[in-house]
Amino acid sequence: MNRDDNRLELVWRYVEGVASKEEVQTLEQLLREDMIFRHQYLRYLNIDSGISRAPSPDRSAKTIDHLLADKTTSHHTIYSARPRIARLTAALAAGFLVGLIGTSITWAMSQSRMVATLAPVSTLLDGTFESSPGLISSGFPTTIGTWSGDEAVVVKTSAIDGTPPDHRLHFITPKADTATPGGRAIACDVFQIVDLRPWKSERNEHIEATLELSANFFDTRPAGTLPTITFFCQMFLFKGEPTEMHQSWPLRNDEAISTASAFFTSAGGISSNPRQLKTRCLLPQDADFAVVQLTARPNIRPTELTSAYADNVLLNLKTQPTLPVRQAEQ
């Protein structure tokens, strides 16, 4: 018996339900590794599934592998060969192949597409504050891509704790919001408007897009110092014209079509090793811009902020194919 005969005999034993555990493992390995054998296996099942259509007792003693080897055998003869293999058995075997091979092949062919891509949003500018030394602009930003807000200054870290030259945003004084000048000054807020329109072409019903915002915060006071300071890292997504937002911030916050926020409360002791805050939200197809907000809020007011800093603001866009949804059984 040659190799092909041995393999077909193995398939026959599996379909008949008499294959040993070792034989099933051998069959699985062959189906994974040999494309030609997979085609032979499917042909065998197709022939087997049609046997019951026209049974012929006089040919029942001839096995399927012998019929396959006979080049003169007609399809009608094969269909009439062996009635004892039911369609259900062949269907179950075909299901085994689909489960074992079909899924693996589909995954292998599509794995290059079924991945998430993470890329920085280049319209967030100067997230390391290297290009913005000195006092930042006052009030909510009127242009895209600039840091602006309450009283804050970009300083060199060497002036803080002797670390290698770097720049950090130093929160100084809480101010009232631009659109509510008579309001309470609760926290020191710094903003940047980020244009999201260049990425609109990448957003559709087949792509799930997520914005991921992160920033590092420092509280250089000795550990256990009061009052505590609460740091916030948040973003608000809007549709419309971004340069008009300064006229109504924060009165239009309830118009945001997506938001995300992260915070923590500090009592000092965060000097050389920063505390990173990270947050994320879905990026709707109709979002035109984001407002990125960094905040330091003293929890006893009024308080001057002498030790609160931020650095390394990152905004990344994560895209991935939309996965099918299966309703879970109750």
Image (cartoon, grey):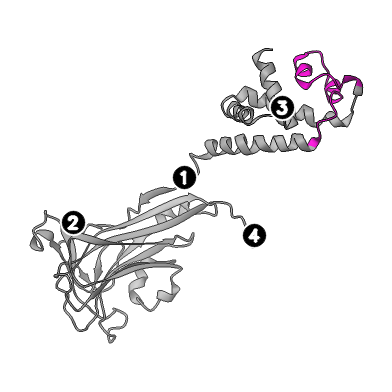
CA distance for labels 2 and 3: 72 Å
Query: Which one is closest to the eye, mark 1 or mark 4?
Result: 4
- Location of the C terminus by quadrant is bottom right
CA distance for labels 1 and 3: 40 Å
- Marks 1 and 2, the one that precedes in the sequence: 1
In the rendered image of this protein, does residue 238 appear above or below residue 50?
A: below
Mark 2 burial class by Cα count in 10 Å: few <14, some 14-19, many 20+: some
Query: Which one is closest to the eye, mark 4 or mark 2?
Result: 4
165 left or right of 181?
left
Give residue 140's position: percent from left, percent from top.
28, 72
**Hey, what amino acid is under mark 3?**
Arg
Q: Identify the magenta region.
A: 58-87
Give residue 224's position: percent from left, percent from top.
18, 73
CA distance for labels 4 and 2: 54 Å
In the rendered image of this protein, does residue 325 appear above or below residue 260?
A: above
Kindly identify which residue carries mark 2. Answer: 130
- Marks 1 and 4, the one that precedes in the sequence: 1
Disc 1 vs disc 2: Cβ atoms closer than 8 Å? Answer: no
Is residue 82 found inside the magenta-colored segment of the image? yes
Mark 3 burial class by Cα count in 10 Å: few <14, some 14-19, many 20+: some
- Marks 3 and 4, the one that precedes in the sequence: 3
111 left or right of 225?
right
**Hey, what amino acid is under mark 4?**
Glu
Kindly identify which residue carries mark 3. Answer: 13
CA distance for labels 1 and 2: 33 Å
| Number of the label disc, if any, that sits on residue 115 | 1
Is residue 120 found inside the magenta-colored segment of the image? no
